Image (cartoon, coloured by chain):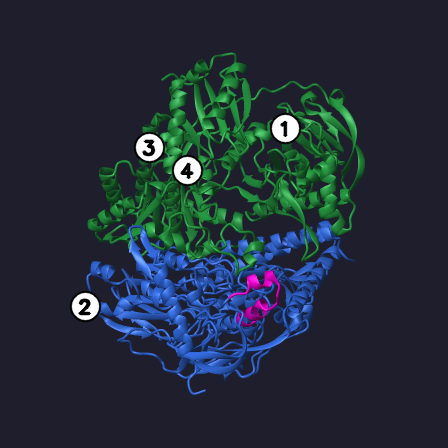
Chain colours: A green, B blue
Amino acid sequence: MEIARSIVGIDTGGTFTDCFALLESGEVLYAKHPTTYDDFSKAVFHCLNEISMNAEVSLNELLRNSLLYYGTTIATNTLFTRSGVRTGLITTKGFEDIPLMMRGTGKVAGLSEEEIKRQTRTRKPEPIIPRKYIKGVVERIDSQGNVVVPLDFNEVESAVSDLISAGIRSIAVCMLNSPVNPKHEIAVGEYIKREHPDIHVSLSHRISQVVGEYPRMMATIINAYVEPIVRDHLKSLEGKLKSKGYGRDLYVTTIYGSVLPAHSINSIETVESGPAMGIVGSAFFSSLLGIENVIATDVGGTTFKVGIIHNGEWSYIREPMLERFQIAIPMIDVFSISAGGGTVVWVDSVTNLIKIGPKSAGSEPGPVCYDRGGKEPTLTDACLILGYINPDYFLRGRMKLNKERALEIFREKIADPMGMDVVEAAYEAVRIMVSQCADAIRLNTVMRGFDPAEFTILAYGGAGGLFSAQYAQELGIERVYIPHLAPVFEAMSIIASDVRRIYRHPYMRIMPVDAEELSKEFLKLEGIALNDMEKMGFDPAKVDLMRWIELRYSKQINVERVGVKRGELDDGDVHRIMDDFDRIYEESYGKGTAYRKAGIESVNLIVEAIYHVPKIRFKKQKSYGSDSSKALKEKREVFIDGDYSISCVYDGSKLKAGNVVLGPAIIEYPATTVVVPGDRLARVDEYLNVVIQASSG
Amino acid sequence: MRLASVEFEILRHKLWTILAEGRAALKRVSGSPTVAFGEAMAALYSSKGECVLSGTGVLLHVMGAPEVITRIMEIYGDDIREGDVFFSNDPWIGTAHTADQYCIAPIFYGDEVVAWGVTLTHVGDIGGIEPGSMPSTAKEIFHEGFVIPFLKIADKKGLRQDFVEFVHKNLRDPEMYILDVKAKIAGLEVIRKRILDVIEKYGIEKFRALMSELIEKTTEIARNKISKLPDKKLTAVGYIDYDGVEYVVKKVVCTLIKNGDRLVFDFSGTDEQNPSPLNCTYYGTLGSVFVALMGTLFYDTYWNSGLLKNVEIVAPEGTLVNARWPSACSQAPPAPGKLITGLVTHLISRLMLESGEKELELSASASWSTESASVILGGVNQFGARFGGLLWESGHLAGTGANIDMDGCDSGGSQMHPIPSCPDVEVYEQKYPVLYLYRKHRKDSCGFGKYRGGVGVEAAYMIYNAKGEVKVNIAGGYGGSEIISFPLNGGLPAETVKSCFVIFDEKPKVEDVFRIVNRIEDAFKLGGQVFVGGGLTKSFTLKNGDIVLAYSAQGGAGFGDPIDRDPEMVRKDVEDEITSVDVAEKVYGVRLIKSRSGFVVDLLETEKLRRDMRMERIKKSRDVEGDMECLECGFRSDYRKYRDIKLRNFFFNNSVLNESGFFGMRAYYCPKCGSQVDVEVYLKGE
């Protein structure tokens, strides 16, 4: 197959399906269409048609010459709406209640601090598999992989038969210690495939290869639950694409920020890929601009998300939370709080304070000013009241916002009860939002031993421009980048991604280990990785491999990973790994915290296989000088920095590279608004990003 | 100066975030799984030592720290400098037992101490008469490791070497302990730095205002809440049948007196302290009372010293709830700590149910687990190294109490840990020389009721691949007769915890063991020697192949009459392996028929069964004076009907201890409709 000449990325989001195409010429095209929930592919093809039109080629030609990356939320949505298939679980006898016990944590997992305090009322989420569809079979493998009790096949047969008579369509299989020896899981899987080929089977050791049965079981259960639906959807989309001329594999985005051929991954790997891709895009963006340390923030309609890129690298969460379940699939670390454009502002009658969230007005009915029947004031309403948002220019004028209504509701529900002026009340709501965003950022930087002041903020998402200058100010952060494509940054990030997969294997040893054994184990894991990549269609010779070993101090629960060099290792290398661990540990937790005397243990070996894909090269614009007057639209009274002031309002699409805008100012774009506070200025860089920094700087 | 309301909210949120960061730093640095899984606290105190804010870490010690800070200021006076860290683990000055250890640091702004940071962890070994943190054979405090009222253990230069050397000579596992101390100090450092950032940014006056307003607001909110409860005096009694040395009945009496905006918990009438670690000092009691109140009455206000201002505790010296030095008290948090928490939860819930306020009624709860039995292992592991550890099912997988409108949570944890977390079986098998046979919900272990309590959990494992001797002991729990579980409105108490060890002369086949053993009662089917655990057990020495079985995570108590439970819910319980068919019929009066997809309720039979049960109750019971109003049928009268009902079987037939025979259980019924309105344990002969 010819090498693709263009890359097309499609992101099916909650409200819109966005599409980015990087053509061979270097040109970047973009299309958008409301997500079609009855059939996701409709919006996809709308976008592809628009792109091909703008590229002046036929759809067939576009597809024939492109590689398609597809970001879908179908797995996550299926889980959230509980519309997966009837699923069963086969596990080791005696451990049928593991997914129901949820380690105890399930009672409060995913809840806010306030909710957790109401101890007597919190409960676990509804289980995905009811107890009666969980079957235990006699078998046992120990922590070293020895078979202690052989698999009782009679029990397997009757378990499967019971599940099938109950209408189960998908079976998760999770035996204790299977990552160390998957023999029994494989046997059960083969039996089901043989006797009941139309039943989906998910084996836990293929979903996740780490020790710790609860999160592995949950990953497997959720995979089994959504798999048939995800597969059907992907197959159908692939079929349609093929019929229109697409001849390559369809790639999908993953929870750890990569793209992989659809047929080669487990459905569970596609969940929460949106936020993950945002971080990948941020890392790409930062390297483009030569910035090593970035705090990536996504201000959307319901949530505020933060991800940290340090020395150009992001980090992973080992057991991320999906809804209220912990799963053993590494996820790019993104922290989120309920604070977005649609977050409801309210007055707490117990403490008599203004509060924001966690409730959101969503997009239906949405903020009061949308005039769709929304009766609860939101942060968007507050921004409208303050004069930041132009009611006549929302979505390029396609939607008129009702400022009077917003004022009325804000007055009734917030200002009057608090005895405040309505504009002041709106301002306070925004201050609280900004402060909580700053707190979330600080929590995530300081906790890792980083100083936020050493970072640059990147703010994307629909509402990034409204608040980011202010939370940057609060953190003492010098510069904020609001990318040119902020509202669709996540979608753009998809085509900034590589093909990458993570392979892990338990390796429990006391350090220092025998260098020869360690080399052999890494080679084995690398072999599995290369094999896998080859099966996906990639030339192993072109695949980059990276190695890590996860370590902890003996008797500790928490783990850090240390990079390991490729090739043959010697004793010196092993000791270097241990020294690196001490150093990384102290960097994270503070000087003097490394206590080598406690001893170091290894936990897992990790290999990441990467196949680099050609990236976007954004065209640098030439500078037009700092004079931004041609883009000046009007002057408007806004409430900014605690007071009324007359701000200049600029048309973002008329600003050119090099232009400078002095605060206080508002820059309006079709899909977003940037607020520049009084003591800041905004500079448009050579990529048409808006960079906000101190006026004196 | 007073803060504007928005400023207050912004600063409060910052403070909360700072404490979360401190606790996170502490957990990450710590050496022990114990801490990593939740036994840690980080809180901020004012310059006077009052608690300004605590988060959702372990709750037991928040209210004890002010005393420690006050004494530190007295004793050290001028010798308190920036960078100092003080240590305290004295059960008569703040903590519940020697294993729960405070690290306390002053936060200086310029020359002045403007606040104090406090962190605390439960440590794995205290250097006591046995390995671990809660030695069961201790008779006095002198057997429970070192007791340090206050000591400066770090200064600007770091952890003091004299303390490090002291640790190395006094503990069995000094490395892990030192990591733990460093963790607490790391947490304090994060808090200190971040507080200074806030002061830099907002000014010292605003910071001071924040601290005092947090306490003021809380005091007022707490006072308002208390005022909403009816003025009343209620008493509840918790019996235990084991004093740590022998089987003798003792009681904890708690009388709740609510008057206007004040609450008093009066423990007068409580029996004399025990000659064993089953004692609470005043601080153990203080902490246990507040654990109960924080999650029920005070769930929606800030958790700080403001809560204390309108609550009084009367705890007579020399009793189980205020043991005098030098008594042992290493078991305080579970025993009698959880019993105290259960009593208070029950009493305050009764008032909340009568308050007429929907929010309060909904937050009321039957008692959660009131006993627990932590399994402590120590010896030589599969790697040939010495090890010691606590297995965490008991605290973190216990069932919670039922509410007025819903069942308790199965395997939902304990009140003192708002965020439960029990490590995976596979993780334990990597660390300890054990092979688990099962870890599962224990059927029928909850308190039955219209709304049942959550069921608890039982686990069993074999000692496996140990390269040397392994000692096991089970800490906590009582003799094993039932009944320190406090249901509400006619619900029933949960099953008492149980444990045993099976020691083999000739090891049975592993496969047979796996097939035969499904619950603790099956221990007797294996042909080995069964030692029934009860109360504190001495250490047992086990070898490879020997088995430990424990239903250590107790169920929660029930709410309301079981025969009022929706039969569909009973059906689901049976399908979920939570309730047995036997109990479904005998207790809930629900007849189930097996169907292809599980079970179906036989509605007609069920109706008949329940009707018969009601009639039988009225016929077979006696009258007793006492005002009542039946919540089911509305009948009001000055008498109730009552009869004795059976306690659950204590253990099983061949046990060493059968029913202890000390207690009886009595059910009270509405004379008109036969609804079970109350269930109470009584001491025979009283």
* Badge 4 vs badge 2, beta-carbon distance below 8 Å: no
**Whole-number angstrom distance, CA of label 4 to CA of label 2:** 49 Å
Whether residue B186 is visible to the viewer of this picture, yes or no, is no
Q: Is residue B346 magenta?
A: yes
**Whole-number angstrom distance, CA of label 3 to CA of label 4:** 15 Å
**Whole-number angstrom distance, CA of label 1 to CA of label 2:** 77 Å
Q: Chain of mark 2?
A: B
Residue B313 is situated, as x and y percent measured from the top left of the image, at 60, 76
Q: Nearer the viewer, mark 4 or mark 2?
A: 4
Graded by Cα atoms within 10 Å as few (under 14), some (14 to 19) or many (20 or more), the crowding at tag 3 reads some
Which one is nearer the viewer's eye here, B245 or A519?
Answer: B245
Q: Which residue is mark 1?
A: A671
Residue B506, disc? 2
Find the magenta span and give its range: B345-365
Q: Please state, as top left, top right, bottom left or bottom right, where the N terminus of chain B lies in the image.
A: bottom right
- Name the chief secondary structure element in magenta: helix
Which one is nearer the viewer's eye here, A646 or B221?
Answer: B221
Q: Amino acid at mark 3?
A: Asp
Q: Which residue is mark 3?
A: A532
Q: Which residue is mark 4?
A: A269
Q: Amino acid at mark 2?
A: Glu
* Badge 1 vs badge 2, beta-carbon distance below 8 Å: no
SS label for mark 3: helix
* Residue at figure coordinates x 58%, y 67% from the top left: B352
Q: Same chain for the residues at labels 3 and 1, yes or no? A: yes
A7 relative to A134, above or below: above
Quadrant of the rendered image containing residue A103: bottom left
Q: Same chain for the residues at labels 4 and 1, yes or no? A: yes
SS label for mark 4: helix
A75 relative to B137, above or below: above
Residue B412, disc? none
**Whole-number angstrom distance, CA of label 3 to CA of label 2:** 48 Å
